[in-house]
C-alpha cells in the first residue's frame, strides 16, 4: 500500500517522515538497516543506537493505493513541515524530490566532488552507443504529453503556501543557495539570451550586442536612450542586426 509514514522516537519526541509505494516493506527495510547499524540516515542511526529499538514507533499517517508519486512527494513535504522533522527531527531534507534543504558539510561536498571527478566518474571516457541513445529517446517519449502522469493535473490548491513555508523553514535552518551572489557563466547567459523569443541583436558603432539590455550594461547608456536611437534616423550607427547594412 502506498502512503506517508512516521518513525517517532518516544523519548525525544522527534519524528522522521517518509513516503513509499509499499509501507510494509519500507518499515521492514528501515528497521533492518538500523539493527545492522548501516542506515543511510546517520542522525536517525545514532539516535537508534543510543535509545534502542523499543523507543521507536513506525506509524502510517496516510495510505491510499491510488496516490500518484507527485501526491506522495507533496504530502511528504507537508508532513515534514507539520511535524517540524527537518529542523527538529530526523529528516535530512524538506521532503519531496531530491535533497531540498539538505545542508552538506564542506567535507561531504569535497568527498562527493572527488568521487565524481575524472576517472572517479563511472562514465569517464565513455559514451552511449547509438542503440542506447535510441532506447533512452524511446523511454523519454513515454513521459511526454498525455503519457506524463501529471498531464492535465494541477498541484493542490494550497501548494504555493506549502512551498512558501518550506523555503521559510529552509532559510531559518541556515540554508543558503550556493548560487547566491555568484554570477552565471558567460556561456550560460548567452545561451539564455539566445533562447528569449523577443530578444533582438543590435549593432552599435559596429559592435554586435545580444540585446538592448546587454548593450546598456556594457556601454553604460540607458536602455531608453538606446531604444530611442534605434528608431531615430539621426543615429545610423544604432541598428537592429536584422537590418541590412
Image (cartoon, rainbow, N blue to C red):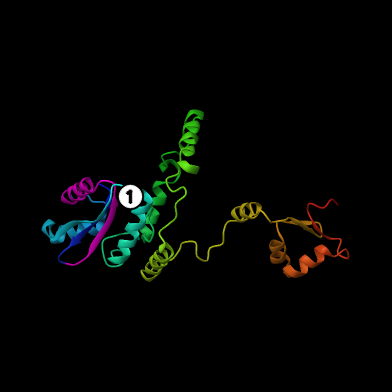
Q: Residue at x 82, y 53 (%)?
A: 243
Question: Residue at image x 26%, y 64%?
Answer: 89
Q: Position of residue 151 (x, y in %)?
A: 46, 47
Residue nearest the viewer, comparing 159 with 140: 159
Magenta span includes 30:
yes
Quadrant of res 13: bottom left
In magenta segment, residue 205: no
Question: In the displayed structure, does residue 215 sit left or right of residue 148?
Answer: right
Looking at the picture, how far across and down is residue 121, in whole percent?
42, 42
Residue designated by label 1: 67
- Crowd class of label 1 (few under 14; some 14 to 19; many from 20; radius 10 Å): some
Tag count: 1
Q: Is residue 223 left or right of residue 10?
A: right
- In the displayed orientation, state which residue is furthest to the left: 54
Helix, strand or loop status at disc 1: loop
Foreground pick, 111 / 192: 192
- Name the spot of residue 43 as percent of width and height, x first: 25, 59
Q: Residue at x 71, y 66 (%)?
A: 216
Residue 81, x across and y down, in percent = 32, 65
- Toward the right, the furthest residue is 234
Magenta highlight range: 12-36
- Identify which residue is drawn at 69% across, 66% down: 217
Amino acid at each position: 500500500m502506498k502512503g506517508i509514514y512516521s518513525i517517532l522516537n518516544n523519548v525525544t519526541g522527534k519524528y522522521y517522515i517518509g513516503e513509499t509505494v509499499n509501507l510494509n516493506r519500507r518499515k521492514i527495510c528501515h528497521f533492518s538497516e538500523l539493527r545492522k547499524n548501516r542506515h543511510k540516515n546517520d542522525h536517525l542511526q545514532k539516535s537508534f543506537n543510543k535509545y534502542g529499538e523499543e523507543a521507536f514507533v513506525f506509524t502510517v499517517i496516510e495510505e491510499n493505493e491510488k496516490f500518484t508519486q507527485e501526491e506522495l512527494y507533496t504530502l511528504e513535504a507537508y508532513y515534514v513541515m507539520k511535524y517540524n522533522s527537518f529542523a527538529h527531527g530526523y529528516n535530512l531534507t524538506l521532503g519531496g524530490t531530491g535533497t531540498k534543504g539538505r545542508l552538506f558539510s564542506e567535507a561531504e561536498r569535497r568527498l562527493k566532488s572527488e568521487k565524481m571527478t575524472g576517472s572517479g566518474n563511472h562514465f569517464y571516457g565513455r559514451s552511449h552507443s547509438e542503440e542506447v541513445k535510441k532506447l533512452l529517446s524511446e523511454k523519454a517519449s513515454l513521459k511526454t504529453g498525455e503519457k506524463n502522469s501529471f498531464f492535465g493535473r494541477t498541484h493542490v490548491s494550497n501548494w504555493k503556501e506549502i512551498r512558501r513555508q518550506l523555503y521559510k523553514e529552509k532559510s531559518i535552518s541556515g540554508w543558503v543557495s550556493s548560487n547566491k551572489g555568484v554570477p552565471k557563466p558567460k556561456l550560460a547567459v548567452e545561451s539564455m539570451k539566445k533562447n528569449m523569443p523577443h530578444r533582438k541583436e543590435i549593432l552599435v558603432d559596429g559592435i554586435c550586442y545580444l540585446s538592448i539590455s546587454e548593450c546598456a550594461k556594457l556601454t553604460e547608456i540607458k536602455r531608453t536612450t538606446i531604444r530611442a536611437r534605434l528608431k531615430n534616423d539621426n543615429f545610423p550607427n544604432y541598428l537592429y542586426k536584422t537590418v541590412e547594412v
